Image (cartoon, helix red, strand yellow):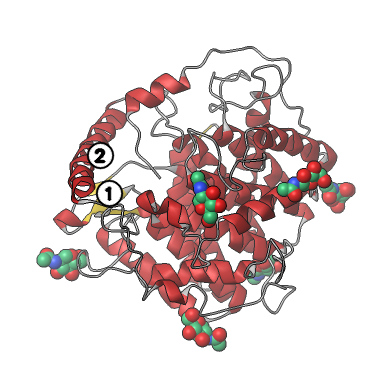
Amino acid sequence: MKFASSALSALSASALLLSGAGAIELNLDDPASIKKAAGVAAAGMRKLYTGDNPGDVPGNLPDPYYWWEAGAMFGAFIDYWYYTGDDQYNNITTQAMQHQIGQYNAFMPSNQSKSLGNDDQAFWGMAAMSAAENKLPDLPTTGDLAGPSWLALAQAVFNTQAGRWNDKTCGGGLNWQIYQFNNGYTYRNTISNGCYFNIAARLYKYTGNDTYSKEAIKTWNWESRIGLFDKDLHFYDGSDEGKNCTEINQIQWTYNLGVHLSGAAAMWNATQDEVWKTRITQMIKTMGDTFFRDDVMYEVACELNGKCNTDQRSFKAYLARWMGYTMLVAPFTKDLMWTKVRTSAAAAAKQCNAGSGSQCGLRWYNNGQNDGSTGVGEQMAAMEIIQNLLITNVSGPVTETKGGTSKSDPSAGGEAENDPIVFSEITTGDKAGAGFLTTVVLIGILAGAWWMVAN
Ligand SMILES: *[C@@H]1O[C@H](CO)[C@@H](O)[C@H](O)[C@H]1NC(C)=O
Ligand SMILES: *[C@@H]1O[C@H](CO)[C@@H](O)[C@H](O)[C@H]1NC(C)=O
Ligand SMILES: *[C@@H]1O[C@H](CO)[C@@H](O)[C@H](O)[C@H]1NC(C)=O
Ligand SMILES: *[C@@H]1O[C@H](CO)[C@@H](O)[C@H](O)[C@H]1NC(C)=O
Ligand SMILES: *[C@@H]1O[C@H](CO)[C@@H](O)[C@H](O)[C@H]1NC(C)=O
Ligand SMILES: *[C@@H]1O[C@H](CO)[C@@H](O)[C@H](O)[C@H]1NC(C)=O
C-alpha cells in the first residue's frame, strides 16, 4: 500500500458530479433484489478490470490502482460468488490469481518486488484463504492454469511472513515492507500485522493446527504491547522501529479494525474462549462509535474532508467483508451489527447513481447522491456491504473436517526463506534515492496525520 499526498488525492477525487440515471434498487428483505443489486455493483467493478484483455497482464488493474487492490478485488469476487451463486466472474478470478502466484508459490511475483509489502502479499493470501473457505474450485494440477491448492497458497503466505517476524527492534512484529531496500521498510504498520493475525487465525480455524493459533496470539499480544491498539480497541495506523516503536501514528482506518475483528471471530469460533468474545464485543462497540454515523459506515480519517486516496477509498469494502465473515463464524455478533449492515447497504445502494448508469461513490450518507468519486474501491465497498445481506443464505466457511476440499501443505512457500532474491537492478544510486524518498514519505505521513486530525 502506498501513501499519496493529500493534495493529489483531493484533486483526483474531485471529478465532476454527474447526476445519474438511477440508484441501485434494493429491497433489504428480498433476497432476489439483494442479489440483483450486488450484481449491478459487481458489473461496475468488473468493467474497470482490464487484465484479461489480450496483451494485458491477468491480475493487474490499470493505473492508478496498485497490485494489492487487485488481490483485494478478487477476494471480493470470491465472496460475491459465494453469497449470490453468480459464477460469471470465477474464471477471471482464477486466471488472475494463478497468474500472480510468483516463483515461490506465495504471491511474491518478482516484478512487484520493488514495492512489495507484507500487507500487499497478504491481500492476495486472504483471497486464497476465502477461496478455500468458500470452496472455489482449486487450480488444476496440470495444464496452463496449474497451481497449488488455495489452502496451500494461504499457508505459503503465512509461512513466508512467519519467517519475517522481526524482534531485533520493537520486541517483535512484521515490518511493512518485505525487502529492506524499499521505502517504508522500518514502519511497523498495523495492517501488515493485522493481516498476518487474520490469516493465522483463519488457518487455525480451518486446519486445527495450533502452530497457527500460537502465531495469532503472539501477534495480538505484540500489537497490544506496542500500542497499535488501545484498551478500548481503537486500532491505530502503525509505529516506526527507528524509535523502537515508542511512538504511534494514531490515524484510524476501518480496515485495521475489521481485519482484527474477523481474525478474533475465527479464534472465538475455533476455541470458544470468552477472552475473544469480550474483545469482539468491545471491537464492535468501538467500531460503531468510530466508523458509523446513524448506522452508516464512513472512513472517518478522510471521507468528510475529501482526502481519501485511491487505496483508502477501498477500505470500507474490507470492514464490510469482515463484518460478514464475523457474523457467519461468531453468530452472537449478528444482533450487534445487523442494523448497521442493513442501514449502510441501503445508503450505499442509493448513491450508486453516477455517470450514465449506477456507479457508486465514496460517501454513503450523501443524501442518495453520488459524491463525485467513482472507481474500483467505491464499487467494491458498495458491493460488499450489499452482498452481506445474504449471509443468512450461506452456511459459512468450511474447515478441513467440515466440508473442506482444498489440500493442506504445511510447508508451502518454504523455499522462499533461504533463497533471498537478488536484485541486480538496484544500484547504489537507487538506494540513496530510496533513503531520500523514505524521509519524504515519513514527513508526508506526519503532515497527513496532522491534517486529518486538524480537519
Ligand atoms: C470467462 O468466461 C466468459 C464467458 O464464458 C468468456 O467470455 C471469457 O473469455 C472467459 N475468460 C477467461 C479468462 O477464461
Ligand atoms: C510480471 O510477471 C508475470 C509473471 O509472474 C508476467 O506474466 C507479467 O507479464 C509481468 N509484468 C507485469 C507488468 O506484471
Ligand atoms: C524496544 O522495545 C521492546 C518492546 O517494547 C523492548 O523490549 C526493548 O527493551 C526496547 N529496546 C530498547 C533498546 O529500548
Ligand atoms: C463456527 O463457524 C461455522 C462456520 O464456519 C459455523 O457453522 C459454526 O456454527 C460456528 N461455531 C459456533 C460455535 O458458532
Ligand atoms: C435465500 O434464502 C431464501 C429463504 O431461505 C430463499 O427464498 C432465497 O431464494 C434464497 N436466495 C438466494 C439468492 O439464494
Ligand atoms: C502444523 O503446522 C506447522 C507449521 O506449518 C507444521 O510444521 C506442522 O507439520 C503442522 N502439523 C500438522 C499436523 O499438519
Q: Residues within 10 Å of mark 2 (few under 14, many from 20)?
A: some
Of labels 2 and 1, earlier in sequence is 1
**Whether residue 295 is visible:** no
Q: Secondary structure at mark 2?
A: helix
Ligand 3 has an atom within 8 Å of the beta carbon of the residue at disc 1: no
Q: Is residue 353 or residue 294 the one in the foreground?
A: 353
**Residue 384 occupies which quadrant of the picture?**
top right
> The C terminus is located in which quarter?
top left
Question: Residue 29 location in percent, x, y?
Answer: 79, 39
Q: Residue 184: which numbered mark, if any?
A: 1
Question: Residue 399 location in percent, x, y?
Answer: 67, 73
**Whether residue 309 is visible:** yes
Q: Quadrant of ligand 4?
A: bottom right
Question: Residue 264 location in percent, x, y?
Answer: 50, 63
Asked whether the beta carbons under mark 2 and mark 1 sit within 8 Å of each other, the answer is: yes
176 above or below 165? above
Question: Residue 314 location in percent, x, y?
Answer: 52, 38
Q: Which residue is mark 2?
A: 441
Circle 2: residue type: Val
Circle 1: residue type: Gly
Q: Is residue 269 or residue 190 the one in the foreground?
A: 190
The residue located at (64%, 19%) in the rendering is 354
